[in-house]
Image: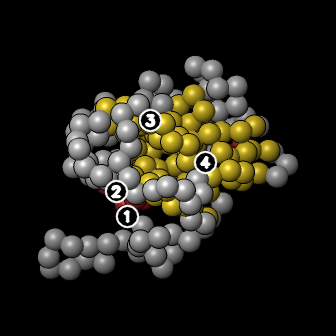
Amino acid sequence: FKWGNPFSWSYSGEVADAIKERVKAAGGSVTGELCCRLAWDNTDDLDLSMREPNGDSVNYISALRYESSNGGMLDLDANGRDGLRKDPAENIVYDKIHKMKEGQYILSVHQYRKRGSGREGFQAQIEFGGQTFNFQVDRAVRQGERIEIATLEYRRASGLKIVKSLGEAAGVVGSGPEVWG
């Protein structure tokens, strides 16, 4: 929806989806069969990464390696290689799940460079198979801290599923397939 003022929101599956729209506006892909998104509201350099099966340097997606041999790609690196943004977002996308190697994939967020003193956290989102899973950290992420968002498992016979994810812990909120916001 848009009005005659600077406010607007998008409507997707009857729920506003600000993270997906932020990624799209920054030029990231939102059409892959597996999309992992990150959004936050300060100038810190948070990095979204995915450790893939046999997580060596070839099978690891991060700000240091944008593409993997399993078909994954980091196409946004806000407050890093893509420059400072007032509405930062990062995005890892796999166009085709069947190209992925079988095994576990670990999605995490790393505080690479803390620039502010605010208490803001971040929101993360995983979308696949027609479902969207949302996670939120409601506290500042310390310099050098790494937070594991979820462990996904891919098997050709059974497909992709989340086998472990953030639970309700100190400052951390995870939600199921319903989109928050």
For the residues marked 3 and 4, what is the alpha-carbon distance in whole angstroms? 16 Å
* Circles 1 and 2: CB atoms closer than 8 Å: yes
The secondary element bearing badge 2 is classed as helix
Where residue 96 sits: x, y (%)? 64, 45
Query: Residue 137's mark?
Result: none
Q: Which residue corresponds to the image point at 70% horizontal and 31% vertical from the top-left? A: 53
User: In screen coordinates, is 67 left or right of 162?
Assistant: left
Residue density around tag 1, few if under 14, some if 14–19, many if 20 or more, within 10 Å: some
Say which label, 1 or 3, has the lower sequence index: 1
| Percent of width and height locating residue 40 | 34, 51
Residue 145's tag is 3
Task: Compute the Cα span from label 1 to label 3.
Answer: 25 Å
Residue reaching furthest top?
A: 57
The amino acid beneath tag 4 is Ala
Q: Label 2 sits on what residue type?
A: Arg
Q: Are marks 2 and 3 in contact (CB under 8 Å)?
A: no
Residue linked to disc 1: 18
Q: Nearer the viewer, mark 3 or mark 4?
A: 3
The residue type indicated by label 3 comes to Glu
- Residue that carries the numbered disc 2 in the rendered image: 22
Let me know if residue 179 appears in the view.
yes
Residue 150: assigned label: 4
Q: Are marks 4 and 1 in contact (CB under 8 Å)?
A: no
Q: Secondary structure at mark 1?
A: helix
Is residue 123 in view? Answer: no
Q: Is residue 46 above or below residue 6?
A: above
Q: Nearer the viewer, mark 2 or mark 3?
A: 3
Mark nearer the viewer, 4 or 1: 4
Which quadrant is the N terminus positioned in?
Answer: bottom left
Q: Which of the two labelled residues, at mark 4 and mark 2, occupies the earlier sequence position?
A: 2
